[in-house]
Image (cartoon, grey):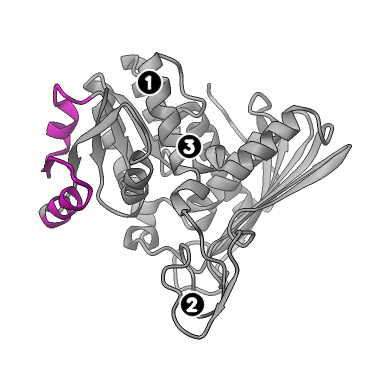
Amino acid sequence: MIRIAMLGSGFVCDFFMRALRYVPGQVVVVNFSRSEARASKFAAEWGVSEWTTDMRAAVARDDVDLVAVGLPNDAHAPACIAAAEAGKAVVCTKPLGRNGPEAKTILDAVREHGVWHGYAETEAFMPDVLRARQAVEDGAIGKVLIVRAREAHTGSHASYAWDVEKSGGGPLLGMGIHAVAACRIFVGKDVMPKEVFCWADTLEHDVPFEDNAIALIRFENDSLGQVEAGWSNHGGMDVRTEVYGTDGLIHINSTHGTPIRAFSLNSIGYVQEKADSDTGWTFPQADEAWQYGYHGQMFHFVEALSQGKPSDEDFVDGYIANMVIDAAYRSAKSRQWEPVNLDL
């Protein structure tokens, strides 16, 4: 039985808990939140027996095997390092750090203390992405030449995401990091990104960072990744990936290609994350936690940890993604190709 300390009580941790309902061999024994009200509410809603506002106390408990970090970006490093120092396995949501050096500090901590680590990148566990990945690995479309990945909506619901000191950046970091993962999944995770060219600008929102960005990633084998991220997309989440190879192509539409399409004059209820409307034409998600990969990743993390196997996605992947985004931000300023300076 894997015993979990859930750090956070917001949007991401709700998805973690929705997924864990279907994962055998685990139990969440404590929830940490910086707010007593939110911690007690979260614990009551999800049937967690204990809660606390003391993060280190939650992590250090003798009955905790795995720490799941679903906190705002600025809290990832303190939480992950605390888990490593306590000798606990740790899972962290994206992005691993607010920037590459911070991510490297986290990676160094888990390596120094020899703890198991998993990077909760949902792209790697989405059912449609997994099926497409298998097709690519089986050689269905030949050598992958170009991967185009897009993540967009109208702006984050989380207040910290609008504060650059807490978030580390705009949608290029917050959403583009998913697209970086998608590119690596299909180009091949053993193929390192070598340089990035990026356009980023503030087109709509009153924010001190970009609200739309496009980045090109050149990989060591000369494959090209194209990352699109932005906060100017109405109609709900737009998550798409296109893979082009020498012998074919694969298109994935994770949010608008749902099996359910409806037209209603009255509210249809919850549609999907960031949906603008619940009337008219809608594309309701049957189970967002499943479609977005939360079920798959939580099952994988619990199973891998219980069997003593490394995670398919770990903090090395998180660090690489952060370093690609760092290069993209540099390129947006220099208007030149910028190297991805990995220190693995």
Q: Find the distance from the CA under tag 3 to the CA under tag 1.
A: 14 Å
Mark number for residue 318?
Answer: none
Relative vertical location of residue 117 with respect to residue 29 in this rendering, above or below: above
Check residue 305 in the rendering and tell me which mark sits there, or answer none: 1
Vertical order, 178 against 311 (above or below): below
Query: Residue 271, how many percent across, how many down?
Result: 47, 67
Between 111 and 187, the one lying in front of the other is: 187
Residue type at numbered disc 2 = Ser
Indicate which disc, 2 or 3, sits on the residue closer to the N terminus.
Answer: 2
Determine which residue is flagged by label 3: 296
Is 298 contained in the magenta span? no
First along the sequence among labels 1 and 2: 2
Amino acid under disc 3 = Gly
For the record, the magenta segment spans 37-64
Secondary structure, mark 3, is: helix
Q: Would residue 245 appear left or right of 47 to someone viewing this image?
A: right
Identify the amino acid type marked 1: Leu
- The residue where tag 2 is placed is 277
Graded by Cα atoms within 10 Å as few (under 14), some (14 to 19) or many (20 or more), the crowding at tag 2 reads some
Q: Residue furthest right?
A: 247
In this view of the protein, can residue 228 be seen by the observer? no
Q: Is residue 35 left or right of residue 6?
A: left
> Where is 182 relative to 109, above or below?
below
Name the residue: 53% across, 38% down: 125
